[in-house]
Amino acid sequence: MTRWPDTRLQRLLGIEHPIVQGGMVYNAGARLAAAVSNAGGLGLIGAGSMRPDLFGEQVRKARGLTDRPFGVNLPLLFPHVHECLDIALNEGVRIFFTSAGSPRQVAGRLKDAGCTVVHVVAHPDLARKCEQAGCDAVVCEGFEAGGHNGRDEITTLVLVPQCVRAVSIPVIAAGGIATGEQVAAMLALGAAGVQVGSRFAVTLESSGHDAFKQAVVDAGPGDTHLMLKAHVPVRLLRNAFRDRIAAMEARGATREELAAELGQGRARRGMLEGDLQEGELEIGQVAGLIDDVPTAGEVMRRLVEDCGRTLARLAGPGSDDDARG
Amino acid sequence: MTRWPDTRLQRLLGIEHPIVQGGMVYNAGARLAAAVSNAGGLGLIGAGSMRPDLFGEQVRKARGLTDRPFGVNLPLLFPHVHECLDIALNEGVRIFFTSAGSPRQVAGRLKDAGCTVVHVVAHPDLARKCEQAGCDAVVCEGFEAGGHNGRDEITTLVLVPQCVRAVSIPVIAAGGIATGEQVAAMLALGAAGVQVGSRFAVTLESSGHDAFKQAVVDAGPGDTHLMLKAHVPVRLLRNAFRDRIAAMEARGATREELAAELGQGRARRGMLEGDLQEGELEIGQVAGLIDDVPTAGEVMRRLVEDCGRTLARLAGPGSDDDARG
């Protein structure tokens, strides 16, 4: 058994391992969330790409697939957020991860209903605001993360220590984490645990298209880029669509020109329908460390075991006595 | 005493602690390098901002200030590189860190002279080329690093594991490292040690201007940005000069327009002469974690002690038995 040096998150969420699966659009449905929860982590259903009826169906489905705690991710700028929030509460969900927007909008109501509330941030000042708003923990997500991202481009290695200094609630590190060694590194920085997105997007239970998963497996180290930095920053895998956006940005295209090129439904087209050239392929920089499409349970096993082995390696038996041998 | 879990770098460089001080332009002269070496790390004199006569003088001065090993950093695209290389060899320097350009240019000659050669890279493919060229180790420097930077924007958290997979020579992690917890995190990722730049730039022994050091102390979490990404990427602290460059880039300025605005001597003006508005202030994203101007020896003491305390924390006494308590 891996001995976790920090157990705050396990106690807060009722889980065995301090590993949260990100609530990624088009990837994080009931099957993935239940598989992660069954393996001892916390699965999240991502509401951001679902209409309320589908979201309710997925929550009920997940409840049928696991007896363990799972949660939902609600982007607060999402048009159906209040409807989805009601559905989740009615279905008995008690763990809410919120992102985008301000946690003040919903934290009070959720806390009154006895829920655990965790908000995703990309700057230590916002982590502080989350603590003041009553959040139980914060996800601190760095520049390397896939999909939507902060404007300040603060990397996980720099962001996590700043957030640990800024708040006393548990900090969950996110962005750039796909291996057990990286989990151990985040514990070294003072994180209570991690949120892992891309690695879980590329599993058998993820609802992303097989072609999307294979494109991530095939991606090299420098194949994702943070695009639209001046508008809505989003990290994308390189393809024809991304290259057109990059060329437009390089020549100083206006917000309106970019919005017209983006159009509607690009993320669905890329990640759910598998259009690798004209779709929006949201994935983190760790794409270059992802080589296969295992089960979510296998990912959990690797993260836990490799983290445990790393912690054991760091504990010894090296010595400074032979350092200059 | 801190027990280091990995002692490859200590043996390779003849040092006590696996901490290298970056050879930063306008900051890394003899005083800083000698102070770091005297404290058990490896000090580097940065040739990149020196004419050959000043460089030779600094190497001789450092030799008078420490009996311990120290090295030099030579940017291989620097016009005086061969002259400086001859000077360093003649003065008995046997540790060379090279950056920019290809290590093939000089690695053979330096290895024949019995030197240790370490090259700085920002992509795992280049780490592989360094190993093939005969380098003894590689510095893998991520997106968060100050000053000149790679084009692929790979962060330290993602880059280091990729480089550890790619090569069998020791990997020295760089970019975003200013605390002992971050040193421990890099050891978790499989790095043999770290190179620390910004934190040593803001010490009493650094030759940077006091106003520059104070500007870094005053900087907040999001106050550095990677600029000129399509040309020669460089991370700068926000000021009037940087804001003008940012505005030019946003409107799609050409390489020629940017070069004209950059002009000559901006880095000297900012870091050595202390012109905080019109100078180029090269510093890493960890500026937001730097709060004071201590001695280099005090920085070494903190890095070593805080890393040791972090490794002890990770080794126990947490347990999964109380995880669901």
Image (cartoon, coloured by chain):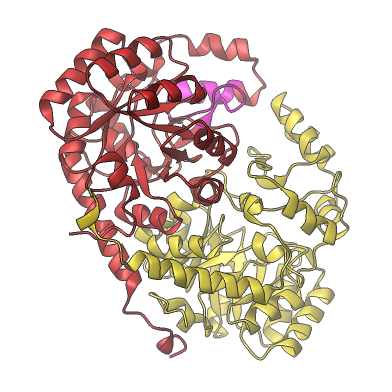
Chain colours: A yellow, B red
Task: Examine the structure image and report whether residue B241 is included in the region drawn in magenta.
Answer: yes
Residue B95: give x, y in percent of width and height: 31, 30
Looking at the image, can residue A107 be seen? no
The residue drawn where x is 35% and y is 52% is B183
In the rendered image, which quarter is residue B68 located in?
top left
Looking at the image, can residue B230 be seen? yes
Residue A314: give x, y in percent of width and height: 36, 64
| Viewer-side residue, B114 vs A263 | B114
Task: Examine the structure image and report whether residue A270 is included in the region drawn in magenta.
Answer: no
The residue drawn where x is 44% and y is 25% is B107
Quarter holding the N terminus of chain B is bottom left
Left-right relation of A155 to A277: left
Left-right relation of B298 to A127: left
Vertical position of residue B49 compared to residue A67: above or below = above
The residue drawn where x is 26% and y is 24% is B93
Q: Give the residues drawn in magenta, as a range.
A: B226-248
Vertical position of residue B228 compared to residue A183: above or below = above
The residue drawn where x is 68% and y is 39% is A228
| Viewer-side residue, A41 vs B56 | B56
Residue A202: give x, y in percent of width and height: 72, 63
Left-right relation of A1 to B305: right
Residue B9: give x, y in percent of width and height: 33, 46
Tell me how many marks there are: 0
Quarter holding the C terminus of chain B is bottom left
